[in-house]
Image (tube, rainbow, N blue to C red):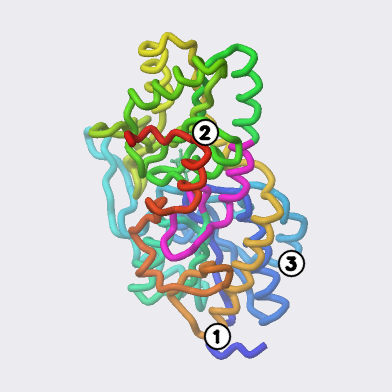
Amino acid sequence: MANGNHIRRIGLLTGGGDCPGLNAVIRAVTKSAVARHDIEVFGIRDGFLGLIEDRIHPLGFEDVSNILDRGGTILGTSNKADPSRFAVGRDAHGDPIFEDVTSRVVDHVATHRLDAIVCIGGDGTMSGAARLADHGVPIVGIPKTIDNDLMHTDVTFGFDTAVSTATDALDRIRTTAASHHRVMLVEMMGRNAGWLTLHSGAAAGADVILIPEIPYSLDVVCDACVRRSKKGRAFTIVAVAEGSAPVGGSVVVDHVVHESPDPIRLGGVSEVLCAQIAEQTKLESRATILGHVQRGGRPTARDRVLGTMFGQHAVAQLVSGELNRMVAMRDGSLTTVPLAEVADKQRLVPPDDPLLDACRAIGTCFGERT
Ligand code: F6P
C-alpha cells in the first residue's frame, strides 16, 4: 500500500477512562501498520503521562496477539495528564501546581522520531491531542467512551458493551424488585450525556428513565411509581443517569479530582432520589450505583468489530496524509473529522432522538411534566 505521507514510525496511546474494546483498537492499529504499511509502532504507557515521562516502547505483533477479547488496555491509561496543564506538585495548601509541559512532549516525540501519534480517547484526550497538533505533533484520533458523547461520530466503541452490562444489571434488579415489591433505582455513568441510561433503560424496559438532557420533576416520578402500584404492578424500575438533575436543581457531585482536565466526578443522584421517593410515596425503595463495572469486562462482538475498523482506518488515514483528524462513524460509513471540531465539545441526546419517542409511545416516564 502506498505510504504517501512517508510515515515510518508512529506512537500509540490510550487516554482518559478505559472502556471495553481498547485492546481491539491497539491490535488493529499495530497489525495493520506493521503488516500492511511497514510502519514501526511504539506503545506509549498511561496515555499522555507516558508522553510526558518518556515511557515509550516498541510494540510488535507478539505484544498484541491474543488481546482482542480482553477488557481494559494493555498500554494503561490516565485521565489526569493534560500536557498543557500538568500537575507537577502541590503548594503549601495541598493544591496542585500546574505547568505547561507540552515542550517535553514535543522533545520526546522528536527523540523517538515518531512521525505521528495515534490517540485513542474521549473528548478530554481529543482536546489534548488537538493542542499537541497545534504544536506541530501530527495526530490521528480514535473515539472511545462508554458515554457515547463525542461530537461528529454516531457511535464510540465501548458504548455497546456498557449498554449490555447495564441492561444485564437492570434485568437482574427487576427480579428482586418484583419479589420485594419495591421501587428500585439503578444509576448509570455517562457524565452529562444520557445515552447509556437511555439505551440500557429502553433495552431493559425500565418504567422511568431519567437523563441529564431532560430535567425531572420529583412529583412526576413519584406519581409514576404510585400509579404503577395502584394498577397492581408491585414494583417500579427507575434507570437514572449520574448527570440527571431536577427541574431548576443541580447535579449530585461525588468528588472532585483537581488534577484532572475534567475534575468533577458525578455520582449519588439515585441515593438522593431513592430517599425522596420513599419519603413521598411511602413505597419501599432501594438504590444501586453500577459504577465502574460498566467500564470493565470483555468487549461485545460489535465493539471488537468497531474497534478493528476504527484502528485500521486511522492508520490508513495517516498513510494517505490525513492528519489532525479523528476517525468517525457517520450514517454507517467510516470517515474523519477535524480534531478541532471535536475538542471541548459533548454530544448530548437531542430532543428529537427517535428512541425517546419510541419509549414515550410505550409509556416510559422521563420525569417531565406533559
Ligand atoms: O467518561 C467515562 C466515565 O466512566 C464517566 O461515565 C464517569 O462519569 C467517569 O468516567 C468516571 O471517572 P473516574 O474513572 O475518574 O471515576
Tell me what residue is drawn at x 40 percent, y 48 percent.
80
The residue wearing badge 2 is 291
Majority secondary structure in the magenta region: loop
Disc 3 residue: CB within 8 Å of ligand 1: no
In the picture, the quarter occupied by the C terminus is: top left
Identify whether 365 is placed above or below 213.
Answer: above
Q: Which residue is mark 1?
A: 320
In three-dimensional space, the C-alpha distance between marks 1 and 2, rounded to whole angstroms, equals: 40 Å
Query: Could you tell me how many numbered marks the image carries?
Result: 3
Point out residue 278 in the picture as x, y percentages from the top left corner: 42, 13
- Looking at the rendered structure, the secondary structure element under dot 2 is helix
| Residue identifier under label 3 | 61
- Is residue 98 in sight in this rendering? yes
Q: Secondary structure at mark 1?
A: loop
Q: Position of residue 118 (x, y in %)?
A: 52, 68
Based on the picture, tell me whether residue 165 belongs to the magenta stretch: yes
Q: Can the viewer see residue 55 in this picture?
A: no
> Comparing marks 3 and 1, which lies closer to the viewer?
1
Q: Are marks 3 and 2 in contact (CB under 8 Å)?
A: no
Q: Is residue 92 left or right of residue 352?
A: left
Circle nearer the N terminus (3, 1): 3
